[in-house]
Image: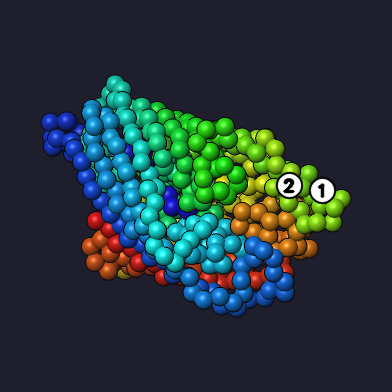
Amino acid sequence: MLAMNLAAPASAQTGPVEAEDSAAPDRYNLHGQFTSVTQWHGPFNSPYQGPNSLQPHEPRMETVDLTLYLGLRLWKGAEFYVNPEIDQGFGLSSTLGMAGFSSGESYKLGNWTPYYKTQRAFLRQTLDLEGPTVEVEDGPNQLAGRRGEQSLTLTAGKFSIVDIFDTNPYAHDPKSDFLNWSIIDAGAFDYGGDAWGFTYGTAAEWTMKDWTLRGGFFALSTEPGSVKIDSSFAQNSVVLEAERRYQWQGQPGALKVLWFIDRGRMGRFDQATALSQATGAPASAAAVREFQSKTGYVLNLAQALGEHGGLFARWSQNDGKTESFDFTDINTSLSVGGTLDGTAWGRCNDRVGLAGVVNGLSSQAKAYFAAGGTGLLIGDGQLPNYGSEKIIEAYYSAQLAPHLSASLNFQRVQNPAYNRDRGPVSIYGVRIHADF
């Protein structure tokens, strides 16, 4: 799932700068990017398969996307952005078979023929509060200028919830760092979005010197995993997040606490399993859908270790009573990892990363998948031997030229889709990324 940080404070300088020392704010900007990810795996143990299983034998799969980031300053503090994008390709097994899927550049659907999407189109209004100002650098979906160190930012339109919430500087962008879904995002954060991970909504951010408080109201898709968004907002999600920035041993860090509630038509696992037992048919959450709520939370830590690297950790959990709505089939998740640049070996623009994640299901979800149920990404037709899905990911990103990098990626997946009878799977990847 594609994500980028839309919040200008994330890339602003940490200290105040006098306004007269800066050039006039940019009126417009244009950036672009190209990313290609190719992944493959060798054969693995697979005694049986279901409708959503990772295939034990399949060719290399590739995804390609080309995006433009156009920005325009409308009036004081107001900016409008639009991101036209062309996509092509498929993830492994059509993005099925692992709850922590292997590529954040893969969507829940694909096409070998290039197709167009306007992934983002949103308005951002920033209101400066009292206090000094800080410099804002030019970048994708960010116009150069200044903002108050204390500010109120309102964002409305079409974008991804994880553009603003659950961000982390060390694990969040599949174009430049890790690839696995449950490492770049909190696995149990069932955030709303269409099959590409984007939705309509509004978010507010109140930024102080050491704190930021965020809240947002967003539309869910029309039904779990749908390509369409419920534009009536009858099915919706509320997300709240508090961020505390601090210094530890002289190095910056941040701790975020996030809570969400999804409200929509979704099936309860226990009702679907009971119906399966009564009829003898495979469990189906779709057969028992009714309007209800799903809640969860995320703890998100980022800690710099000197100028050249840092560590991250995320713990997330949702109530585990209902089917996953728009993200993936995870009820609990713990990820830990870190990144380091190549300064120590004379390659300061290179980066290496290592992370691990453990994903789990609730007791109700285990029974549902054991009864033949399917989810957004997983469903082997049976689950007689449940095990936590454990994934290790490592990557090396090499800067080949200004604005051009190539990465090698490796992931080792134990118990894909929580199934001890399948795997382990070794997944290899190559990523090419260019931007301007």
Task: Report how far apart the C-alphas of labels 2 and 1 lie in the structure.
Answer: 9 Å
Along the horizontal axis of the image, is 337 left or right of 209? Answer: right
- Does residue 209 sit above or below 141 in this rendering? above
Q: Nearer the viewer, residue 255 or 317?
A: 317
* Residue 415 marker: none
- Position of 28 relative to 74 (above/below): below
- In the image, residue 52 lies at what x, y percent? 64, 62
Residue 97: x and y, percent? 61, 63
Labels 2 and 1: the sequence-earlier one: 1
Residue drawn where x is 56% and y is 75% of the image: 58
Q: Quadrant of residue 128?
A: top left
Closer to the camera, 204 or 112? 112
Q: Is residue 192 visible?
A: no
Could you tell me the amino acid type at mark 1? Leu
Mark 1 lies on a secondary structure that is helix
Q: Could you tell me residue 331's position as x and y percent?
A: 65, 48
From the viewer's perspective, tell me whether residue 182 is left or right of residue 200. right
Q: Residues within 10 Å of mark 2 (few under 14, many from 20)?
A: few
Q: Which amino acid, mark 2?
A: Ala
* Image point (29%, 48%), residue name: 69
Tell me what residue is drawn at x 24 percent, y 56 percent.
436
Residue indicated by mark 1? 275
* Residue ID for mark 2: 287
The picture places residue 405, in percent across and down from the top left corner, at: 31, 65
